[in-house]
Amino acid sequence: MVLRLYDTLAREKRDFVPRDPKRVTMYVCGPTVYDFAHIGNARPAVVFDVLYRLLRHTFGEGAVIYARNITDVDDKINARAASEGVPIGRITARYEAAYLEDMGKLGVLAPTLAPHVTDHMDAIIAQIGAIMEQGCAYAAEGHVLFDVSAYENYGRLSRRNLDDMIAGARVEVAPYKKNPHDFVLWKPSKAHEPSWPSPWGEGRPGWHIECSAMIEENLGLPIDIHGGGIDLVFPHHENEIAQGVCAHGHSAPDAYARYWMHNGFLTIEQDKMSKSVGNVLLLHDLVAQVPGEVVRWALLSAHYRQPLDWSAGLITQSKSALDRLYGALRRSAGMGGEADPALLAPVLEAARDDLNTPGAMAGLFAMASELERALNAGDQARAGVARASLCAAGELLGLLQDDPETWFRGGADEALAEQVEALIAARKQAKLARDFAEADRIRDELTSMNIEVMDGPQGTTWRIRD
């Protein structure tokens, strides 16, 4: 089945045909590292990780170049550094490390490239200069601004009419702008803020130019896929297109990126996340309490383009779903085989249909059911094939990556695991000696330790209760 992706610019699904199948390029807007990421920030990271895995499965691991940037200079970073009395590098290093640690817990693969803004000042300044040479930007009072009226296709991605935007503008926010929607490419830094030399004076770049310069420097134009959250369509991605094409005298948006993909909003218990409301859920706190794979499942449980409402119920459902799949893997431990393409097909077909992760998850349950049927029939060869297929499909989605026994033992440390195993062994001996009162006492002791004991034909297993 052909990979089909919904292109925000075209407003329809399109067959994905890379410019060069041996060099497939994707860029996703990454974090601004001034604080811990919230759960909404995790959604695009997980969604586009699935796409990255799918592209590597389709075209080969070495054929896909995925760049996810790090914004390490920004007003919020400056404010955080000033409040702590430290250089911005101290702030950005701390929160980049935390972000990468949290992404690792979610099973997010490292991108091929992680360009940092502060490493690309020369490329940023060069691109600004090229835009000015094309007559699409102007300098004013220490700033360089993009002239949106100079780009005839401005507004195509977001489906906004420039004349309507200008007519609807309430305030001229800066007197040196030609029109309210002109945006900053370069601006002077305030006292004690980081700055870099440029032909227009000491300063730092605007937000939008950073991504377009890093894309051109690291991937070349046009790239195949540009991704991010739906909130970035306007103005960030709209402005990226304008800069990227105008720097080279082009007009068509596909001279910058050939496919645009955006994930939907995430809400918390039906409400928009907001610091004023006090419902911002930090990913760093969440993964300290909930297994990262449960969080990943929850983020993929709705189609990526649809809104996703985060709730305690969603976490419970996600944990239950993974328990069922890991249960099948645990009951089939030690059974080997080769993945069956026929069993994998429904998962792949769903994934290739614009990342239909709910459909792919349904395919995982179908494989688990096939595995259970084989186990019940005593057909180990068939069970081994089903098990291998389930593991392969899980890997495509970044799921089922844990050892089943480890999964069910949760956060049990080595000392607790040894204690539980000793009690289970003692219970087994009591049952063999027909001392059922002692066996029951041991089971009650395990229950008081929040341990669930499960007796089955392949022996006794255990898990920490939720």
Image (cartoon, grey):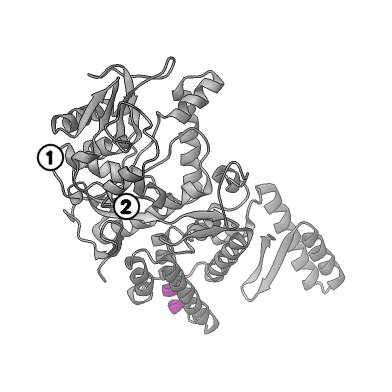
Q: Residue 436: image x %, image y %? A: 84, 72
Question: Would you say 279 lies left or right of 209 here?
Answer: right
- Is there any visible trace of residue 255 in the rendered image? yes
Between residues 47 and 73, which one lies in front from this camera angle? Answer: 73
Residue where numbered disc 2 is placed? 158
Compared to residue 343, the image places residue 257 above or below, namely above
The kind of residue on which mark 2 rests is Ser
What segment is highlighted magenta in the picture?
381-386
Place residue 328 in its image quadrant: bottom right
Secondary structure of the residue carrying tag 2 is loop
Q: Residue at 77% x, 56% y: name it.
A: 449
Compared to residue 279, the image places residue 183 above or below, namely above
- Is there any visible trace of residue 220 in the rendered image? no
Neighbourhood count class around disc 2 (C-alpha, 10 Å): few under 14, some 14–19, many 20 upward: some
Between residues 160 and 271, which one lies in front from this camera angle? Answer: 160
The kind of residue on which mark 1 rests is Gly
Q: Viewer-nearest of labels 1 and 2?
A: 2
Place residue 319 in its image quadrant: bottom right
Compared to residue 413, the image places residue 178 above or below, namely above
Secondary structure of the residue carrying tag 1 is loop
> Is residue 306 shown in magenta?
no
Considering every residue shown, the one lying at the far bottom of the view is: 377
Compared to residue 65, the image places residue 459 above or below, namely below
Between disc 1 and disc 2, whose residue precedes?
2
Q: Residue 127: image x %, image y %? A: 21, 31
Residue where numbered disc 1 is placed? 249
Q: Residue at 43% x, 14% y: name it.
A: 191
Quadrant containing the N terminus is: bottom left
